[in-house]
Amino acid sequence: MSVLDKFNLSGKYALVTGGGTGIGKAIANGLAEAGADVAVTGRTLSTIEDTAQGIRDIGRESIAVQMDVTNKKSVDEGVDRVIDTWGKLDIAINNSGQFGWIDGVEVDEQDWDRIMDTNVKGVLFCMQAEARVMIPCRSGKIVNNASMSARIVNHPQNQSTYNTSKAAVAHLTRSLAAEWAPLGVKVNSISPGYTVTERTRNASHVAPYRDNWNRDTPVQRPAETSEMVGAVIFLCSGASDFVVGHDLVIDGGFSLW
């Protein structure tokens, strides 16, 4: 097998949470371009169906699965639908997330729960459901979307709750990677830096911070969603079979300072 063959995902079945927009959509499309058939999940049926149709348009199979990652029953039913459709799950990308810029002294219980329920509890629920079908096969790749915020304190905006949630994702990744690697399931994460998405490209609340972020990023710009895809393909492919519990930072060097 050539080195390029190791990156080929033909014959693999994948699931991407939060795949209707942003990084999740880019990853879903990238997995399909690498040969995988992809289940696209999210809460908004119109956006996930749009992604799924785009994947079908390039000749891969895709289903849109409406799913709320904060609801364990919804997650279990979503994974069950993938298994009912394809009979197996080889790759899972846990990308769904909630964001928030809130001064620490102002964080209330609703803010905390909204972010933690999606970013931490939701990732756990998804990993559990995915692992339950992967472990009996002694095979599978799980990639969680953490953040550079798992290891730094962002500035100038205050986002302590979000940072804490992503640190939890990174350590949950390491913990379950150690637990499940002997069972054949490889777990890793990516940690994006500031990334331009549909939601942030023209957002007025983001504009005041852009110059600061670009100045503090060695490459002097934010990432495009497409720049997350190569790392994910690597972590989902045979090229990364000996990579376990790794957090691959994709931040243009921001966290070097």
Image (cartoon, helix red, strand yellow):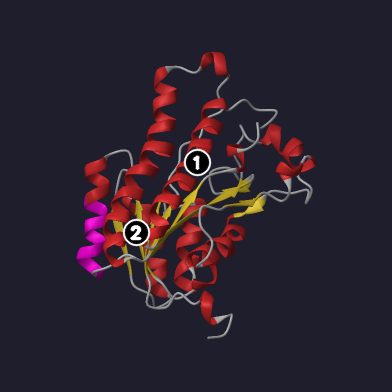
Q: Position of residue 83 (x, y in %)?
A: 24, 63
* Residue numbers of the magenta segment: 77-86
Q: Residue at x 41, y 69 (%)?
A: 55
- Specify few, some or many for label 2: CA neighbours under 10 Å numbering under 14, 14-19, or 20 or more: many
Q: Residue at x 62, y 42 (%)?
A: 148
Q: What secondary structure do most residues of the magenta stretch adopt? A: helix
Residue 239, image quadrant: bottom right
Q: Position of residue 166 (x, y in %)?
A: 52, 38
**In the orientation shown, which residue stands out farthest toward the bottom?**
1
Is residue 84 in the magenta section? yes
Residue 13, image quadrant: bottom left
Q: Secondary structure at mark 2?
A: helix
Q: Residue at x 45, y 17 (%)?
A: 108
Name which residue type carries label 2: Glu
Q: Which mark is residue 163?
A: none
Q: Position of residue 22 (x, y in %)?
A: 51, 51
**In the orientation shown, which residue stands out farthest toward the front?**
182
Name which residue type carries label 1: His
Q: Nearer the viewer, residue 208 or 73?
A: 73
Q: Which residue is mark 2?
A: 49
Q: Nearer the viewer, residue 153 or 57?
A: 153
Is residue 250 in the magenta section? no
